[in-house]
Image: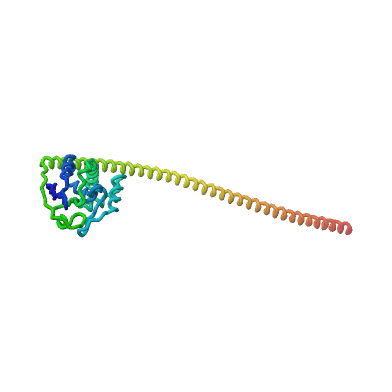
């Protein structure tokens, strides 16, 4: 026996059972806890296996008419559900079920699914217990229903009949209102967070620019000091060079003066010697002349 749930948005929710009757209390309990049936559908596809003591155990995947246990998917979901959210784990879970890849939508849906999942966990376990021939399966749309000749375990079974379970329009509208309010709140929070991030980035950029400007000014002051010190060193070197040149010039001038004085004294000594010699010759000549005059008398 099968229970066909009313459409939620554009999705149909269907429970398919083979060889037994699935308790409608599961659906009633979810509705009583305001859990959207489309959420129950998603959680059932990825989290719930409704056989005896194996309820809410791990995800099952259906491929080629066969159902297998996806332990890797379970580990990734458990890690994301029980620990800090790792979007590398969460995004594939959501996108694989046909949700939008928009990050904000994924975050909103993920938070909502976690809340609904916790609510489902509070449902009495008896709603998930069936006989050994019974299983249940949720599908995205009626066109995606598994073959009626095979049940969730891949074995042949009876053709499932469909019974419509009514859900009031007021409940759907209330759920829609809550969902829109949650989306609006999430959008507003994201905008506020984005504004805070932009403000922090602006403040950080201004601080970095101020720090860079301060460092540039300090570098300019250091450069000016180094240039002034270099000019002072060059001026001191030039002053010393000029002083050394002047000292050498004075020393050369003194040397030349000494040599000139020596030459003058040498000439004067030579002239004095010549004059004395000439005076001695003239004196002797005078004596000779006087002697000759005396002898002549």
**Colour scheme of the rendered structure:** rainbow
In the rendered image, residue 277, in percent from the top left (x then y), is placed at: 79, 57
Q: Is residue 240 visible?
A: yes
In the rendered image, residue 243, in percent from the top left (x then y), is placed at: 58, 48
For the residue pair 184 and 80, the one nearer the viewer reads as: 80
Figure quadrant of residue 172: top left
For the residue pair 258 and 12, the one nearer the viewer reads as: 12
For the residue pair 9 and 59, the one nearer the viewer reads as: 59
In the rendered image, residue 24, in percent from the top left (x then y), is placed at: 15, 45
- The answer to whether residue 98 is left or right of residue 230 is left
- The answer to whether residue 83 is left or right of residue 181 is right
Figure quadrant of residue 292: bottom right
Give the number of callouts: 0
Q: Is residue 144 visible?
A: no
In the rendered image, residue 190, in percent from the top left (x then y), is placed at: 24, 43
- x 22%, y 49%: residue: 51
- The answer to whether residue 16 is left or right of residue 283 is left
């Amino acid at each position: 026996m099968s229970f066909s749930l009313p459409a939620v948005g554009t999705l149909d929710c269907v429970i398919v059972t083979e060889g037994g009757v699935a308790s409608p209390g599961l659906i009633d309990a979810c509705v009583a806890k305001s859990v959207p049936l489309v959420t129950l559908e998603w959680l059932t596809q990825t989290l719930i296996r409704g056989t005896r003591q194996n309820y809410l155990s791990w995800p099952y995947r259906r491929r080629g008419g066969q159902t297998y246990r996806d332990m890797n998917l379970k580990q990734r979901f458990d890690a994301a559900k029980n620990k800090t959210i790792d979007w590398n784990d969460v995004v594939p879970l959501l996108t694989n079920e046909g949700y939008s890849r928009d990050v904000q939508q994924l975050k909103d849906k993920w938070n909502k699914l976690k809340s609904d999942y916790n609510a489902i966990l509070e449902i009495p376990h008896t709603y998930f217990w069936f006989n050994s021939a019974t299983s249940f399966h949720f599908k995205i749309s009626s066109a995606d229903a598994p073959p009626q000749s095979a049940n969730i375990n891949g074995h042949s079974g009876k053709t499932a009949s469909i019974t419509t379970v009514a859900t009031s329009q007021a409940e759907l509208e209330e759920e829609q209102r809550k969902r829109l309010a949650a989306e609006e709140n999430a959008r507003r929070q994201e905008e506020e967070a984005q504004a805070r991030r932009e403000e922090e980035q602006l403040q950080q950029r201004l601080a970095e620019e101020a720090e860079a400007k301060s460092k540039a000014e300090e570098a300019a002051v250091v450069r000016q000091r180094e240039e002034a010190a270099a000019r002072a060193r060059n001026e001191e070197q030039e002053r010393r060079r000029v002083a050394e040149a002047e000292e050498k010039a004075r020393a050369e001038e003194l040397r030349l003066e000494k040599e000139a004085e020596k030459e003058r004294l040498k000439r004067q000594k030579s002239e004095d010697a010549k004059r004395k010699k000439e005076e001695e010759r003239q004196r002797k000549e005078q004596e000779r002349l006087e002697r000759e005059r005396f002898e002549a008398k």
